[in-house]
Image: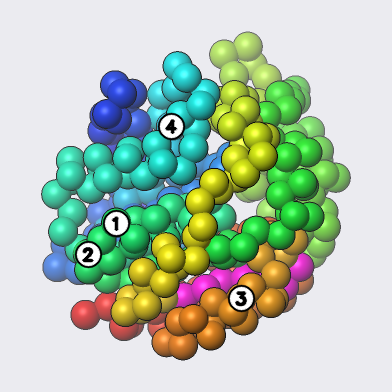
Amino acid sequence: MADWSDGYWWSNDGLRLHYREYAGDTSRPPIVCIPGLTRNARDFEGVAGRLAGDWRLICVELRGRGESAYAKDPMTYVPLTYLQDLEALVRELALTRFVLFGTSLGGLMTMLLAMSDSRRIAAALINDIGPVLEPRGIENIRSYVGRAQNWPTWLHAARALAEAQRDRYPDWDLDQWLTFAKRLCKLSPGGRIVLDYDMRLAEPFKLPGGEAGVDLWPAFRSLADTPTLLVRGELSDLLSLETAEQMKAEHPKMETVTVPRIGHAPTLEEPEAAEAIDKLLARVG
């Protein structure tokens, strides 16, 4: 596993937010990695392990996740506030040009960052998300997000996650589920394994339209002149094949890859995804 250092920045409303930084070639634009709704910086451990050294990676934790502070007002767990937080990071680190890797919610944030100013984005990876979110996938997320759970051991956590999400990753073995559990969860002060996010982030998400709240097609179109890669899990219940094809029609230069026998969302460590990532990064001038 690649070494990293901890970094912090402050939100406009006074929260201390956290990121992991993996050192790399500073002559290249850094890769800013933005995880999904209930995920954290550990989501990109495998990606960073492969790319660090050649690339500098900044793996952020949105408010309420991982080591980032939990919000006092749960209604700030919305894309507009996340965008303000990410723009504060861009300013703090004086990032003038960067690559974006966004998984699920992170992909939505990638589009919104592009809409703010696409000229600074050297390349973009959108992982299993699009401007249209499938109702079945949204209902699936709503069914589990914000449900506090705990387990006595990592093995119990891994088996519970496997039972709940086997349809997403049907071919994973126990070691892969253990890795997944250690990325998604943490050891609590009481010695139990718990999910590593603020359960209250579900509150705005469960409101009508709370999963996005804006028309994302204009945001996606902001990437029209940016080298872009769309990764889709073959079994995804959130990004339909029809939406992926419409995205390709809107952005003909966008590369697409489908990861076989994977649902929402690919880890980006799959051979098909890794090869596509390398091709995307080769386009970064």
| Spatial CA span between label 2 and label 4 | 23 Å
Q: Is residue 274 left or right of residue 184?
A: left
| Spatial CA span between label 3 and label 4 | 29 Å
Q: Position of residue 222 (x, y in %)?
A: 36, 69
| Residue range of the region highlighted in magenta in the rendering | 229-235
| Spatial CA span between label 3 and label 1 | 23 Å
Question: Mark on residue 244?
Answer: 3
Q: Which residue is mark 2?
A: 120
Q: Position of residue 24 (x, y in %)?
A: 24, 60
Q: Which residue is mark 4?
A: 63
> Residue drawn 34% across and 56% down?
113
What residue type is disc 3 on? Ala
Mark 2: give few (<14), some (14-19) or many (20+) Cα within 10 Å.
some
Q: Which residue is mark 1?
A: 116
User: Which numbered disc, 3 or 1, marks the residue that appears first in the sequence?
Assistant: 1
Quarter of the view holding residue 38: top right
> Residue drawn 41% across and 24% down?
69
Q: Nearer the viewer, residue 259 or 256?
A: 256
Does 20 sit above or below residue 243?
Answer: above
Question: Mark on residue 3?
Answer: none
| Spatial CA span between label 1 and label 4 | 20 Å
Q: Residue furthest right?
A: 163
